[in-house]
Image: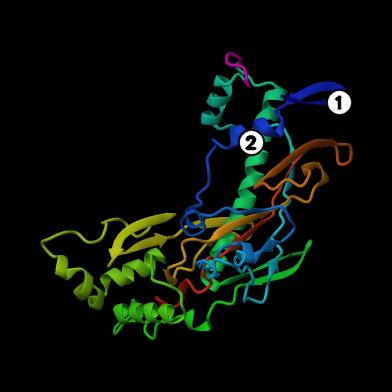
Amino acid sequence: MPQSFTVSGAPLELLDVGELALIHSNYKPMNTWLIDKLFPNRPSFDRDEVPMAEISTVHDLAPLVSPHQPGKPFDTKRAAKAEFVQPAYYKPKNMVTPATAFDEALMERLRTAGIISTGAQQLSDQEKMVIAQIAVMKRNHDAIDNSVLLMATELMLKGKYLLQSDDYEYNMVDYERDASLTFTPLTPWNQAGAKPVTDIETIEQRKLDANGGSTKLYIMSGKVWAALFANEEFKERFVKPYAGIAVPYKPSLNVQEGASFKGHLDDKELWVFDATYRLASGVKRFIPDDYFGAISDTDGSIAQCKIKNMLANGAVQKYFDRQWYSEDPSGIFLMTESAPLAVPSNKNGVCGGTGFIA
């Protein structure tokens, strides 16, 4: 149902947040490859904190009980220091002002749905506001998704991440990854004398020693991949044996944004990840260009806690959207709230670091 406002004494009908969400879900989804690859689970908790014991990070064993004794519940006690972790809380709020720039693909969908007129040569002010609504919701949702992606990236890189701002108290979420899993090679892989195969074997041993499990994939920058693929030790071990038989690695440019699959090292996937994001201070990378990591934990979670807004009625959802008319400052505002937290399945499921190229 449309949501009606009275602005400057005139009625204005805009899409309600439910309709906006349906349209936005089909509108230019952002790249969430790293979250989808390493954090596929989406648990929800009807509370203000994430109970770590309820996120399965170990394999359950059935309790051994005599047939003449009562059954026993699973032990949900957690050995780590933090039993409960407070999630992040995001509340982007932006004013809806008439759109001045238009996406043709979006316009066509809106015409097909009958939301904007099909024959008019010029958009009405109401239609411009509807288009602006969609843009504001997308901006709010993308801002949250980018923040969660940064949270998950920091967790992958360091085993911890900091939640702090001028309007949010200091909250260091530290899962206490084993210190031995931070690794920098003695010789960068793009320099003479580098031994990347030996380094990777050391990484694998350290991860096994820390109960981090067997590697499922490697993530690195395009520059690190170029140095690895050009290294003689690597070629002797993993390229030359396939000469005349098969192409072991996917031929492609090493310079491309986003995630690029390169092939397998033994049975482990090789991925290059060069995605960037933009802040007011400029363009930044999600992972450093000298990073290499061996990943065994591909079963992490992005948990959601309940929305702390009385109008949400205790709802637990990824986005809680609300729009309203304000007298001061005067305008229609659209706000989105979310309470996510990135959680590893195995805190020692990553070994790697920076310094892999000079």
Residue 119 covered by magenta stretch: yes
* Mark 1, secondary structure of its residue: loop
Q: What is the three-letter code of the residue carrying label 1?
A: Ser
How many numbered marks have been drawn onto this rendered protein structure?
2
Residue 132 seen in render: no
Residue drawn at the location 53% of the way across and 83% of the way down:
179
The residue lying toward the viewer, choosing from 246 and 356, is: 246
Residue with the mark numbered 1: 8
Question: What's drawn in magenta, residue-wise?
Answer: 115-120
Q: Main secondary structure of the magenta part?
A: loop
Q: Residue 204: image x %, image y %? A: 37, 77
Q: What is the three-letter code of the residue carrying label 2?
A: Ala
Q: Residue 289: image x %, image y %? A: 45, 68
- Sequence-wise, the earlier of marks 1 and 2 is 1
**With 123 as the anchor, is 292 left or right in this view?**
left
Residue 158 covered by magenta stretch: no
Q: Residue 160: image x %, image y %? A: 60, 71
Q: Which mark is residue 21?
A: 2
Figure check: 267 above or below 91: below
